[in-house]
Image (spheres, coloured by chain):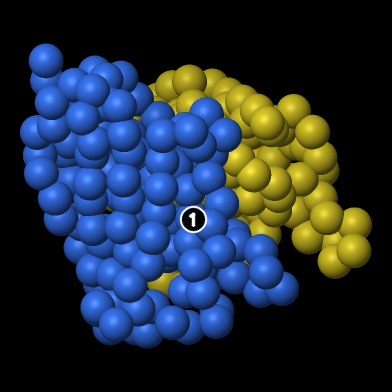
Amino acid sequence: DIVMTQSPDSLAVSLGERATINCKSSQSVLYSSNNKNYLAWYQQKPGQPPKVLIYWASTRESGVPDRFSGSGSVTDFTLTISGLQAEDVAVYYCQQYYSTPITFGQGTRLEIK
Amino acid sequence: QLQLQESGPGLVKSSETLSLTCTVSGDSISSSNYYWGWVRQPPGKGLEWIGSIYYSGTTYYNPSLKSRVAISVDTSKSQFSLKLNSVTAADTAVYYCARQPSTSGWFFWFDSWGQGTLVTVFS
């Protein structure tokens, strides 16, 4: 199984500042034949299902604000939220879909400082 | 607009079988562009993929659950279903159904989710 490890487990950021969440996979999720990283990012607010923000490591889902961006390749990935807003308080998960079983990171809780 | 709705008992007795159904509306469950999956989340914990199914019936399961799980699809009813047998308290979770884009026989991220249903296993 590919183990996804996120850091930090929680962080507090001031409104308007940048939040950075890291995700490391235990093996490469870069598929060489198409040069795509099989990684997605989700946001989950209390009492709601997860919502996809980013797929292919850096492609923003339609309707997702451009303050959310994804970067990284192979085994190391980052979700960046630029200009944090109050509505961004949530738990964020990374997920690999390179191989089964599909696996998620343990989650990072983002709060306002 | 795509909607997914989970249904099924909210309480299941230990050692029995958990059965849930996801009804899909606003899109065809027979689309060749998607797989349909189940994900669960124990209270206060993270996400665990259970398995995914294509409209043709092709299934993939999490090996950690494979001996106990079965996912099926009924295209005539626009539904897919989950059965998990021999449940224990560790199976208590919110169960989500979700859609996964697919190409070339593989499936990817979850782009649309149901609201989830809490299933509690009791003894």
Quadrant for residue B111, please give it.
bottom left
Q: Secondary structure at mark 1?
A: strand
Q: Position of residue B40 (x, y in %)?
A: 35, 39
Residue positioned 23% across, 51% down in the render: B20
Check the rendered structure and report the hue given to chain A. yellow
> In the rendered image, is residue B123 in sight?
yes
Which chain does the numbered disc 1 sit on? B
Quadrant for residue B93, please give it.
top left
Chain that appears blue: B
Q: Position of residue B45 (x, y in %)?
A: 34, 25
Residue positioned 10% across, 39% down in the render: B10
In the displayed structure, B98 sits above or below B11; it is: below
In the displayed structure, B1 sits above or below A60; it is: below
Q: Which residue is mark 1?
A: B52
Quadrant for residue A60, please give it.
bottom right
**Of the pair B17 and A4, the residue shown nearer to us:** B17
Q: Position of residue B44 (x, y in %)?
A: 28, 24
The residue at the far top in this view is B123
Q: Position of residue A64 (x, y in %)?
A: 44, 65
**Of the pair B67 and B24, the residue shown nearer to us:** B67
- For the C terminus of chain A, which image quadrant? top left
**Of the pair B121 and A48, the residue shown nearer to us:** B121
Amino acid, disc 1: Ser
**Of the pair B59 and B33, the residue shown nearer to us:** B59
- For the N terminus of chain A, which image quadrant? top right
Residue positioned 41% across, 34% down in the render: B68
Residue positioned 26% across, 62% down in the render: B22
Judged left or right of residue B19, residue B61 is right
Crowding around mark 1 (Cα neighbors within 10 Å: few <14, some 14 to 19, many 20+) is: many
